[in-house]
Amino acid sequence: MITRRTLLSGAGAGLALTGAAESVPAGLRLGAGKRDLWSMSGGPHLRGAVIVQRRVYPSLDGGQFLGSGVVGAPVTDQALDDLAAAGANLISWSGPGPFAESAPYAVDSAIVDHIALWLDRCRARGLYTVLCLRSGPGRSAFAFHPDETWYPAGLYDVSVWSNDAAQAAWAQMVVWTLRAFGAHPALAGVVAMDEPNGIDEGHGGVWEPFAARIAGAVAAADADRVTPLLLSPDRWARTAHAADLRAAVGPGPILALHDYEPWTYTHQDQGDRRNFNARSDLLNRPDPALGPWAMMEFGAVRYAPGLTDYLEDRIMAFEAAGANWAAFRWTHGWRPYEAREDSMTLPHSPEAMALMRRVWSRNARRPS
């Protein structure tokens, strides 16, 4: 079991890359490479679902909605057991990175503990996981809610798009994460930034060189020798920007894509009754020349007409391409949260779950 003691020995505030490398025991950097998990030849190899967590702010969240821990909402053992029993072998975790959001961007021991425990919990159930770094230096989780007013405006932080020091720290955070956790048997990959949205923040053209900076730091540190780096295109991981990203970062990183098209179908309001048309609402697949990719998020509200047909259409396309995939989203099993955030919860749709069980039964790979 990875513990904070082994990960943070000698690690201090404002940790530099060299310090990060020295703080990770050499034994944790050994192990067989996992790039074959992402090979599209003979794939998909990983099929599962997405779970999302963020830092808890007691003054905003209270003591129940997201639980009383540092990260919430809690994911219960039963929720993980149920995912494994349904046949999935992947749970993609979107959550806070292990560096603080504010300067000097120190390693956050509580987040490190949370990630370490998460990896052990996944391994115990035969589940691979991908760490999708949702927040970190210069970016809070509220970057995902730019036009909403339910949280204090001061919590909204997207300074990473204009702050060079934050970008440098984010690159360090990705290297640190890969070196610290890369050899854990359950970790299949690390997505450097979940749903980058520089264009939407008025900083078009920033993400591609920023992503190249991350990829360069990872390559220089040989941090992806065991567990691969995944990078998403700008505009919330849209396939339309995949070519720009690949041109910037080169052939090494795997493309982590998200698909919620057509948005008017996938995110319709209850009562809209918008239908999905497989003939016209075609999946935007990346050019094969762009190299390996995975669909790390896709889905629709559970009350969308023809939901199962939509999910099956997308899954068939991923299967044909040999691409790993994760559907949005799995249940946390935490009742106060699920009572309010359930519009896209897969287990709430028996028809969708019947489809998932059928396809997840093809999974053969499990962490050792």
Image: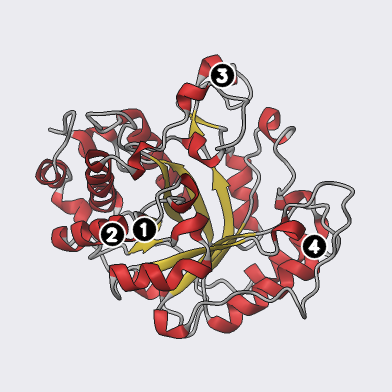
Residue 250: x %, y % from top left: 28, 73
Q: Amino acid at mark 4?
A: Leu
Alpha-carbon span between mark 3 and mark 2? 35 Å
Dots 2 and 1: beta carbons under 8 Å? yes
Circle 4: element type: helix
Dots 4 and 1: beta carbons under 8 Å? no
Circle 2: element type: helix
The numbered dot on residue 307 is 4
Q: Amino acid at mark 1?
A: Gly
Residue 123 visible to the viewer: no
Dots 4 and 2: beta carbons under 8 Å? no
Between discs 3 and 1, the one toward the N terminus:
3
Number of other residues with Cα within 10 Å of mark 3, as a class: few under 14, some 14 to 19, many 20 or more: few
Q: Residue at x 73, y 33 (%)?
A: 340
Between discs 3 and 4, the one toward the N terminus:
3
Residue 46: x %, y % from top left: 51, 68
The residue nearer to you, when weighing 298 against 228, is 298
Q: Amino acid at mark 3?
A: Leu
Circle 3: element type: helix
The label nearer to you, 4 versus 1, is 1
Residue at the farthest top position: 59
Dots 3 and 1: beta carbons under 8 Å? no
Q: Amino acid at mark 2?
A: Pro
Alpha-carbon span between mark 3 and mark 4? 34 Å
The numbered dot on residue 209 is 2
Number of other residues with Cα within 10 Å of mark 2, as a class: few under 14, some 14 to 19, many 20 or more: few
Residue 3, placed above or below residue 261: above
What residue does disc 1 label?
205
